[in-house]
Each structure stands twice: as structure tokens, then as C-alpha cells.
Image (tube, rainbow, N blue to C red):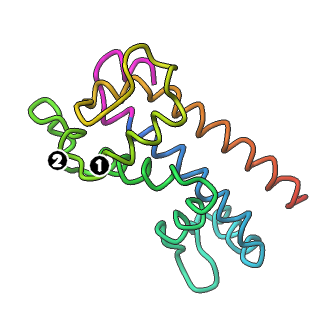
């Protein structure tokens, strides 16, 4: 993450956050759905993906479950998608994707709520740029990773094998 930020590789930094968040979302889904947990885990281990008896489990369904306990999940997921998928955000040399992002107020709210004071300078506001919010990326990654590890511990306690 540090190298990506130092070099201005914003798409890579955003993708790393999104990948870690995807793992957390899936573990939260498994914790909230013990009735399909064994079959879903078996499908993953067999290389067939995140599926239950009815087929592939949609990301949106898992996000809804995860957002219920962590309101910030949806905001990070939506903005992270702009970097995982080929979008206008990849033209950040020409246009600041954060300045044109329609849900930036959500991102600003959660970054200020959970990470204010961890980055030197003023709190984020409507004038904040991608470079401004990128400074928060290591802190957001640490929060996601910490939460993911806690959820994995809970899952491990519930699934003895």
C-alpha cells in the first residue's frame, strides 16, 4: 500500500482496499447465514466460487448483510468499485475522480468519523481531492484488516473444522 501511495498508483491502492473488503464481506455473510455456510465453504474449497444451493451469491446481497453491522462498508465498496473496474476514475491524471464522485459526502462522513486526526491537516470536506483521501488509505486498510481478523476468529469458533 505504501509503495502504491508513494508512486501515485491510486487504482492499485483502491483495488487493494476493495479486495480486503470483499473478504470481510464474505466472512460476515457466512457468520449471518449458518444454514448455507457449509455448502458455501465447500463450494469455495472446490474452486466453484461463492455459491449456495441456488447458485452464485450476489455481491449486493452480501454487502447488504455486511452494511447492516458496518454502515461504512457500502461507501467503501462503491468507491472502491471505481478502481477495480475500468471506469472514469482511471483517468485521474486528467479529472479528479473524487471531486466528481456522486457519493463523496458519504466517504467524507465516514473518513472524518473514524479517522479524523490520523492524517495531518484539516478534516475532509467537499473541496477534498483524491490525493487528500488517499492519505487515509493505510488507516482504512488497517481498520478493514482488523475487522476481518475479528470476524475470521468468530467464524473459526463457530466452524470447528
Q: Residues within 10 Å of mark 1 (few under 14, many from 20)?
A: some
Query: What kind of element bears circle 1?
Result: helix
Going from N to C along the chain, the mark reached first, 2 or 1, is: 1
| Front position in the image: 31 or 131 | 131
Rendered image quadrant of residue 143: top right
| Front position in the image: 87 or 99 | 99
- Residue behind mark 1: 82
Q: Residues within 10 Å of mark 2 (few under 14, many from 20)?
A: some
Q: Is residue 45 left or right of residue 128?
A: right
- Image quarter hosting the C terminus: bottom right
Q: Is residue 82 left or right of residue 117?
A: left
- Residue behind mark 2: 88
- Image quarter hosting the N terminus: top left
The tag on residue 34 is none
Residue drawn at 43 percent across, 13 percent down = 120
Asked if disc 2 and disc 1 are in contact, CB closer than 8 Å, the reply is yes
Residue farthest left in this picture:
94
Query: What kind of element bears circle 2?
Result: helix
Please state the extent of the stretch shown in magenta in the rendering. 1-13
| Image position, residue 55 (x, y; %) | 55, 81
Q: Is residue 55 left or right of residue 102?
A: right
Predominant secondary structure in magenta?
Answer: helix
| Image position, residue 34 (x, y; %) | 77, 72
Q: Is residue 158 above or below residue 146?
A: below
Rendered image quadrant of residue 37: bottom right
Task: Please tell me whether residue 43 belongs to the stretch shown in magenta.
Answer: no
Q: Give the number of callouts.
A: 2
Amino acid at each position: 500500500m505504501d509503495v502504491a501511495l508513494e508512486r501515485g498508483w491510486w487504482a492499485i491502492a483502491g483495488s487493494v482496499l476493495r479486495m480486503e473488503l470483499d473478504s470481510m464481506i464474505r466472512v460476515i455473510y457466512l457468520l449471518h447465514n449458518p444454514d448455507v455456510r457449509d455448502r458455501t465453504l465447500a463450494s469455495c474449497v472446490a474452486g466453484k466460487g461463492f455459491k449456495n444451493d441456488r447458485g452464485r451469491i450476489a455481491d449486493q446481497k452480501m454487502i447488504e448483510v455486511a452494511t447492516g453491522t458496518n454502515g461504512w462498508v457500502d461507501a467503501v465498496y462503491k468507491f472502491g468499485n471505481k478502481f477495480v473496474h475500468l471506469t472514469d476514475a482511471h483517468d485521474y491524471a486528467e479529472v479528479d475522480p473524487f471531486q466528481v464522485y456522486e457519493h463523496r459526502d458519504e466517504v467524507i462522513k465516514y473518513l472524518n468519523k473514524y479517522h479524523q486526526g490520523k492524517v495531518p491537516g484539516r478534516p475532509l470536506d467537499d473541496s477534498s481531492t483524491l490525493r487528500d483521501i488517499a492519505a487515509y488509505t493505510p488507516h482504512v486498510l488497517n481498520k478493514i484488516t482488523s475487522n476481518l481478523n475479528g470476524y475470521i476468529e468468530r467464524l473459526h469458533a463457530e466452524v470447528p473444522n
